[in-house]
Structure formats: structure tokens, C-alpha cells
Image (cartoon, rainbow, N blue to C red):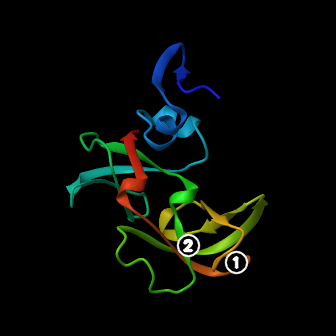
Amino acid sequence: MSNRVAVMNAGRFEQVGSPRELYHHPATRFVAGFVGDTNQWTGEMLPPARGSAAIRLPGGSVIEGTGPAEHSRGACFVRPEAIAVATAPDCFHDLPNRFRGRVSAVLFDGANSAVMIEAPDLGAPLRATLPQTGPMAGLGVGTPVVVGWTADATRIFPA
């Protein structure tokens, strides 16, 4: 694999950088959705609070993240491996992005499992990546869970 990658969209460069940089620090909404798996939600941009940008989803829930806040609509992206999952209902109170849900599918993917979670407050299912071993390895369909992630794990771009 190359140490520098260029991502193009409609004949123009969106971003040039290392694969790691493109994955963890996408410069545009296109790059965020193009490079790797991601969860995506769109909504109304809110004024920055606690040093973070934020989006209000159509159902009223708020997701905090990093990015510009001067637009009326925004899209936020969260990588599946950035999402923590727990079965205890009182987990993740220290995280700005915390939602309740229910496991809708567990997909075996080698060393990890992709866990699909229906979270009504988000308005769309989310995908979390969990290792095959450890406390969350035995999650089954229908299990109630709490998911959470940091604002730094959320990239927000104009929609």
C-alpha cells in the first residue's frame, strides 16, 4: 500500500495524505464517507457548546463532534470501532454521545464482529465493531445496550 493516497471526486482532489490520515482525519464529507466504514447522520447544526460542534437530529437528539459550525445543516460521521457498547444501563455518563438501543444483528467478521444496533433516538441503525473476545463477545440479537462515543470521534461537515 502507498504511503500517500489521493482521493478524487468528480475530477478534483478532495484530500491527499497517508491512509491513516484519510481514515482518521478526513478533510471533507466525501472522504469521510468514501474511506472505510462509517455511521452517518444528518441534521441541523447547533451553536458550539463545551468546545464542540453539534447536530440536532430530526427526532431531537443531539450528537456532539468536531468540525465547522457555521452552516445550517450538517452531516456527522462516526467510525464503528469508535463506538463503545455495554449492557449495563448506567454506562457512559461521561461521554457526550450516549444512546440506548437494542442489538438487531451480529455479523461475524474474522477477528471482530459487526454489531448492528437499533437506537430509536438516532433515527437510523448504527454499526459498532467489537472484538470476538471480551465482555461484549456474547451479545445476541435483542439484547438491550447502551452505546457511547467521544466528541473527538465524531467528524461534522456541512450537509
Count every numbered label the image shows and give the total.
2
Quarter holding the C terminus?
top left
- Would residue 137 be found to the left or right of residue 64 on screen? right
Q: Residues within 10 Å of mark 2 (few under 14, many from 20)?
A: many
Quadrant of the rendered structure where residue 144 is?
A: bottom right
Q: Residues within 10 Å of mark 1 (few under 14, many from 20)?
A: some
- Would residue 110 be found to the left or right of residue 43 on screen? right
Which amino acid is tagged 2?
Val
Residue position marked by numbered label 1 in the rendering: 139
Q: Which of the labelled discs sits on residue 85, or is there none? A: 2
Look at the picture and state if 72 lies above or below 49.
above
At x 51% / y 39%, what residue is drawn? Answer: 20
At x 70% / y 79%, what residue is drawn? Answer: 142
Mark positioned earlier in the residue sequence (2 or 1): 2
- Would residue 51 be found to the left or right of residue 158 on screen? left
**Residue 9, x across and y down, in percent:** 53, 21
Q: Which of the labelled discs sits on residue 99, or is there none? A: none
Q: Using the image as rendered, state which of residue 98 and residue 41 is in the foreground.
A: 98
The outermost residue toward the top is 11
Look at the picture and state if 4 lies above or below 130.
above
Q: Using the image as rendered, state which of residue 18 and residue 6 is in the foreground.
A: 18
Look at the picture and state if 13 lies above or below 128.
above
**Residue 64, x across and y down, in percent:** 34, 58
- Mark 1 residue element: loop
Q: CA distance from mark 2 to mark 1?
A: 10 Å
**Residue 118, x across and y down, in percent:** 61, 68
Which amino acid is tagged 1?
Leu
Residues marked 2 and 1 touching at CB (< 8 Å): yes
Look at the picture and state if 35 lies above or below 151.
above
- Mark 2 residue element: strand
